[in-house]
Image (cartoon, rainbow, N blue to C red):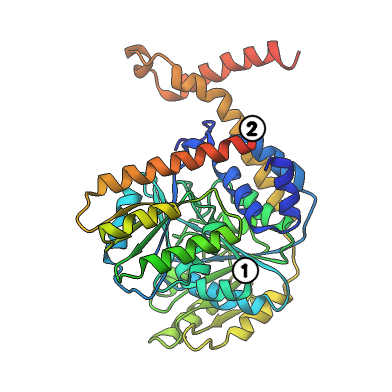
Amino acid sequence: MENGKNRKYTEAPIKVLLAKPAIDGHDRGIFVLARAFRDAGMDVIYAGLLPTPEEVVDTAINEDVDVIALSLLNGAHLTAFKNVIDIMNKKGVHDIAVVGGGIIPDEDKPALEKMGITGNFGPGTPLKIIIDHIKKRAREIRKLRENEYR
Amino acid sequence: MNIDNLIEGILNGDNRSIARAISLVENSDPVSRERIIKGIYSVGNAKVIGITGPPGVGKSTIIGNIAPMLSDYGKVSILAVDPASPFSGGSIMGNRIRMQKSLSRKGIFMRSTSNRLYNGGLSEYSWDIVKILEASGSDFIILETVGSGQSDIDIMNIADITCVILAPGLGDEIQALKSGIMEIGDVFVVNKIDREGSYIAIKDIRETLNLSNKIKTPVIGINSIDIENYDKFLDYIVSWNKKNYREKYVRKLRQIVLEEIYNKYAYYIDNMDYTEDTLKRDPYTTAEIIIDSMNKIIDKSTYK
């Protein structure tokens, strides 16, 4: 990012919030992702261990992130991810993309996609696929927001 | 939501509008930045508390402890700056982890920004962001710098009160004598006083301050684990009533003008023909040539 150049909103670094919105301490994967996203030129915020869904949404609003990346490895994704989506809907937040990941069985994926949580990558997914997916979602969100101000 | 609605939202203290306005200021073109700042400039009267110090001394932890205490005296907002990666431009912002619990409980607005490789301990648009937070009705704005080195002293020009956080074991009295960050504090806080050598650290700083005629500047030893001595620190912050209007204004003015000038010349620098002859000439002469030729154009077009 050079000084003095006129930047466009769509070209600014993508802002991602990484969160594990339930009782789950397996944070190795999310650290790997945090570093990978940073090396891909994104601004990464990690919500820390054991945040409540309210805290996750609060953080996402305050930081004005483009993408919330949720990760759970304890099998509570159908309830915990849904809590986050419900709170977002209640607060009227529709311009933040939500992606998921963790130990998610194939049969749960359609239910998650129906809520608007895409990706749902499991262990062993190449980092490049995840980064590309985040970039794609962020681009959609940026487009949506760009139109609001013109 | 267009910018007028956004400004209205900021003035009403709506978190989503504040957050979006900050993003626009950080990321967008100068036009929307200018419009936002023009719309809100005259509103607000906040005390800006600068927190600076080397990495790992406990700046974020102290903020996490002191922000809920401060919120008994008025509305608190927090802006934290974290360093960007010089290789990818990305960043990992971890300040929030240390304070999230207290923030959610009290409904405190907190924003972390990447410094986007800007030197001096803050980001390029920290002034604008502080202004937005001020207009949103905050009484206190806590501004945390990146873990700073000896020369990251931008904070003194933005903050009304600069708190330098230190820890035991960072150096001897020669280190305390040096210029830079050891001169800018309005209050010095030594965190982790349960550690060995904390009294020597306090003594060294105290002696240096006495030598440089700052006998009234307090040195407070605190311990963030059992919240020891926080009341002294809090009292000092709350009772501080010096404002820093002029410095803030001058600094921002200088930045805006420099940016304008740079934008004018940047086109030439980027599009010049770098032939053998140019590279043989020393850069001082080349700079003079660019400035001279630009001055002629400016004389003709804008000012006459």
Say which chain tag 1 marks. B
Q: Nearer the viewer, residue B79 or B185?
A: B79
What residue is at 58 percent from the left and 24 percent from the top? B264
A111 left or right, relative to B188: left
Q: Amino acid at mark 1?
A: Ile
Among the 4 quarters of the image, the one containing residue A146: top right
Residue A5: x and y, percent?
Answer: 51, 31
Residue with the mark numbered 2:
A150
Q: Which mark is residue B28?
A: none
Q: In the rendered view, tell whether residue B79 sits above or below residue B190.
A: above
Give how far across and how far down residue B39 sits, in percent.
76, 44
Could you tell me how many numbered marks the image carries? 2
Residue B108's label in the rendered image is: 1
Q: Nearer the viewer, residue B147 or B125?
A: B125
- Answer above or below: position of B284 versus A84: above
Comparing A111 with B252, the one in front is: A111
Which sits in the foreground, A107 or B141? Answer: A107
x%, y% of residue A19? 41, 63
- Is residue B114 something that shows in the picture? yes
Residue farthest to the right, as pictured: B42
Asked whether the viewer can see residue B178, the reply is no
Q: Are marks 2 and 1 in contact (CB under 8 Å)?
A: no
- Looking at the image, residue A115 sits to the left or right of residue B236; the answer is left
Which residue is at 62% across, 30% downward?
Answer: B260
> At x 60% / y 29%, what residue is drawn?
B261
Question: The C terminus of chain A appears in which quarter of the rendering?
Answer: top right
Disc 1 is placed on an element classified as loop
